[in-house]
Structure formats: structure tokens, C-alpha cells
Amino acid sequence: YLVLVHFTGGRNNVFLQKEVMVATVYVTGVWGGPMVLAWKTLVAMDWLFAVIFLLLAFTNVLYFTVFDADSDTIDHHPTLLTRIGLRKTLRLFYALSLTTCLAACFSFFYTDLTLYKIASLIYILMDLMMVALIFYKKTTIVGVNYRYLGEMVFWLPGLLLLG
């Protein structure tokens, strides 16, 4: 990320936003290896799950951006929130969340494989948990607990290992 910012001169490019880069690198790390290994056997549903996971990762990074709004503004950190404001960031969060949920619902009803159905339900649960955490942020989440709760959302795919 820092190398890209250095070579582009720090221009205001939407793809160089920290949130986009973090989500992309995370998803590439999680999905990249398995997709390269299974390249010849990938079906459209596999690609859809990778895209849904990218949307979830970006939504999660926006979740942290919303909770870090005060400190990022004070410290002049170049985040999406400090660039477009809290209201637009929340709109983007909810739009991404709705898109994620709709895509996961589509994947649930489109496939006949039980594993894909379970994965779709877990993606929906992950998405709804982040929406609930943002919705109740003022009343229930105190201190740095939001970090633990936000990270725990990505523990949910581990439930597939139990099945």
C-alpha cells in the first residue's frame, strides 16, 4: 500500500484508499491459494463466494473505520471516512451490507450443495452481525471491545469445520 502511494504521488485514487487495499489483500490471502490450486475446477459459485467474501471484508474494514472515526479525524489519518464523512461512509457500509446479504441469499437458493448452503448462511450471519454491531454501537459497545467483536465475525466460517 505504501509503495503504491509513494509511486502515485499520493493522488486521490479511490483504489488507493486504505480500506479497499486492506480488504483486497486480506481476501487474496484467504482465497488466492485455494483458487489457484483449484483453477481448472472452479465454478461460478466459487467466484461468487470469493466476491461475497471481498464485500464482507470491505464491510468489516468500514466497520472499523466508523468506530475509529474520532481518533482518525484527530490524527488526520487518510481514511475513507475522513475523506467522505461519516454519513456517506455509513451509507456505503449499509449498501455493501445489503448487497452482500442479497448475494448470499442468491447463492443459498441457487445451489443444491449443502456445503454451499451452509456457507451462504454463515456469510449472511457474518453480515448481519456487523450491521447489528454498527446499529447498536452507541449503546452496547464500550472501549476497544468493538475490535474483538469485529474480528470475531470472521471466526464464523470456522463453523464449517465442525460440520
Image (tube, rainbow, N blue to C red):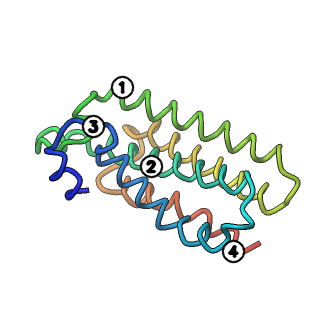
Quarter location, residue 160: bottom right
Q: Earlier in the sequence, mark 3 or mark 2?
A: 3
Q: Is residue 115 visible?
A: yes
Quarter location, residue 147: bottom left
At 52% from the left and 36% from the top, the residue drawn is 96
Percent across and percent down for residue 116 are: 77, 58
At 57% from the left and 46% from the top, the residue drawn is 127
Instruction: Tell me, yes or no, whether the two marked residues, 2 and 4, touch with CB atoms within 8 Å.
Output: no
Along the viewing direction, whichever of 115 and 34 lies nearer the viewer: 34
Q: Secondary structure at mark 4?
A: helix
The three-letter code of the residue at mark 4 reads Leu
Q: Earlier in the sequence, mark 2 or mark 1?
A: 2
Left or right, 131 with reference to 49: left
At 61% from the left and 71% from the top, the residue drawn is 34
Q: Secondary structure at mark 2?
A: helix
The three-letter code of the residue at mark 2 reads Asn
**Numbered badge on residue 57:** none
> Of the residues tagged 3 and 1, which is closer to the observer?
3
Q: Earlier in the sequence, mark 4 or mark 3?
A: 3
The three-letter code of the residue at mark 3 reads Asn
**Would you name the residue on which mark 1 appears?**
88
**Would you name the residue on which mark 3 appears?**
13
